[in-house]
């Protein structure tokens, strides 16, 4: 039967767009579903601050009245301006193993981009770096994380046959929590503390996190640290406010560490949390009626042996100077006390040697790889 591509134009369409991923991966043991409520907010121009500088449309592929694929077409004007390019992004792409479906979805995004003056298509990417990015090309038998997406092995094969090429790769590592803080880290931590007058700061309450705009300053640091990374666009004030109000209330502040200089300026931050992967699978992408209980349990009482390293950010002028050793010397005892066995690094650009080198003193191995594909229009 012929494939029909339809633009999402109603709340009912958007529900089908979100739910298609859940149906396609219903029986897959490695896929971790997004929360439906979060996805509704992400795709809403009214609720997602990224629409201040992005435009988007969403498309569904139908065959004989049944949904067989989906894709989002996005232009991040802020990123295009920063990187001096005219790129249309494809994101949240899913499809059955039929090349006609994937071809038509990507041709639809390409045409949508051409009509708006774009000359290259790239993805999978979201609105910003805070969304999941990259298509899994290695590690199909590994559990996904809250911050990433899973896809079947046939996805990248379709991309290559359709003429897409590698634009960037991210790698992910499994990092084992050591029985003791590596001696190298202890030495480096002591040296940088004395040399640069650095100190560790812990947040002891949610009120403490909001005092002196501390939480906001962490995200401002992220803007500085991540600015050189592939496709990054700086977060706006509204985005920062949203992330602060979303994440700070659910974080276990013991798993958050800040490094400050003598003047009290934040020069590094490490944010981690218990893995939510199994809990999200149990919740099946829904907060209600019982999904909230699985999520709360994973955060408070029935922690997985895995934790997620959500981010490690170091101010550019302190990168490569050992500031991250201070983060690890503080966080490792916390992880040991809470019973974690290993950490998921989540995505790191393969060419970001400063990030890759920080794991050399830990037992670790690369177990996943993701790719951003691109093609000229």
Image: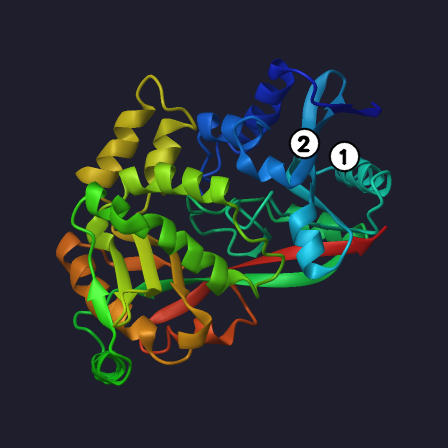
2 vs 1, front mark: 2
Residue at image location 86% in from the left, 42% down from the top: 114
Q: Nearer the viewer, residue 230 or 175?
A: 230
Judge left or right: residue 377 versus residue 263: right
Residue closest to the eye, 59 or 138: 59
Say few, some or many: other residues with alpha carbon within 10 Å of mark 1 (under 14 / 14 to 19 / 20 or more).
Answer: many
Q: Which color scheme is applied?
A: rainbow
In the image, residue 52 above or below residue 365? above
Residue 9 percent location from the top left of the image: 70, 18
Counting labels gives 2
- Label 1 residue SS: helix
227 sits to left or right of 276: right
Residue at point 50%, 76% (across, down): 353
Residue where numbered disc 1 is placed: 101
Q: Is residue 175 above or below residue 69?
A: below
| Residue 97 image offset from top left, x and y in percent | 69, 38
- Which numbered disc flags the more N-terminal residue, 2 or 1? 2
Q: Residue at x 44, y 30 (%)?
A: 35
Instruction: Name the residue that disc number 2 marks.
Output: 70
Q: Quadrant of residue 312?
A: bottom left
Towards the viewer: 74 or 235: 235
Front residue of 330/147: it is 330
Q: Please state the horizontal and vertical placement of residue 198, each as a whole percent of the image.
A: 25, 74
Q: Is residue 297 visible?
A: yes
Label 2 environment density (alpha carbons within 10 Å; few <14, some 14–19, many ≥20) = many
Q: Is residue 205 left or right of residue 267?
A: left
Determine the image quadrant of residue 363: bottom left
Quadrant in which residue 299 is drawn = top left
SS label for mark 2: strand
């Amino acid at each position: 039967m012929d494939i029909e591509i339809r633009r999402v134009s109603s709340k009912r369409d958007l529900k089908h767009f979100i739910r298609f991923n859940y149906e396609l991966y219903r029986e897959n043991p490695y896929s971790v579903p997004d929360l439906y409520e979060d996805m509704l907010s992400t795709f809403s121009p009214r609720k997602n601050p990224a629409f201040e500088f992005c435009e988007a449309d969403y498309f569904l592929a139908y065959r004989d009245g049944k949904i067989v694929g989906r894709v989002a077409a996005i232009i991040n004007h802020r990123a295009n301006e920063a990187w001096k390019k005219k790129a249309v992004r494809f994101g949240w792409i899913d499809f059955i193993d039929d090349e006609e479906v994937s071809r038509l979805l990507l041709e639809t995004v390409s045409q949508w981009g051409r009509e708006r003056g774009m000359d290259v298509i790239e993805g999978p990417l979201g609105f910003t770096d805070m969304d999941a990015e990259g298509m899994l090309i290695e590690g199909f038998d590994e559990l996904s994380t809250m911050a990433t997406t899973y896809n079947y092995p046939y996805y990248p094969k379709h991309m290559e046959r359709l003429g897409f090429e590698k634009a960037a790769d991210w790698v992910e590592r499994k990092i084992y929590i050591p029985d003791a803080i590596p001696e190298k880290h202890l030495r480096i931590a002591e040296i940088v503390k004395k040399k640069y007058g650095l100190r560790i700061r812990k947040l002891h309450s949610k009120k403490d996190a909001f005092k002196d705009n501390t939480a906001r300053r962490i995200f401002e640091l992220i803007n500085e640290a991540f600015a050189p990374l592939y496709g990054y666009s700086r977060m706006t004030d509204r985005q920062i406010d949203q992330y602060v109000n979303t994440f700070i209330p659910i974080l276990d502040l013991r798993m958050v560490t800040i490094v400050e200089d003598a003047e009290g300026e934040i020069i590094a931050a490490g944010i981690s949390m218990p893995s939510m992967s199994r809990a999200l699978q149990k919740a099946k992408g829904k907060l209600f009626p019982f999904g909230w209980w699985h999520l709360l349990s994973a955060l408070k009482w029935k922690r997985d042996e895995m934790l997620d390293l959500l981010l490690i950010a170091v101010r550019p002028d302190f990168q490569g100077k050992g500031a991250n050793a201070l983060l690890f010397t503080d966080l490792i005892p916390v992880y040991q006390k809470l019973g974690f066995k290993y950490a998921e690094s989540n995505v790191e650009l393969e060419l970001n040697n400063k990030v890759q080198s920080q794991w050399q003193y830990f037992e670790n191995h690369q177990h996943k790889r993701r790719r951003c594909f691109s093609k000229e229009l």
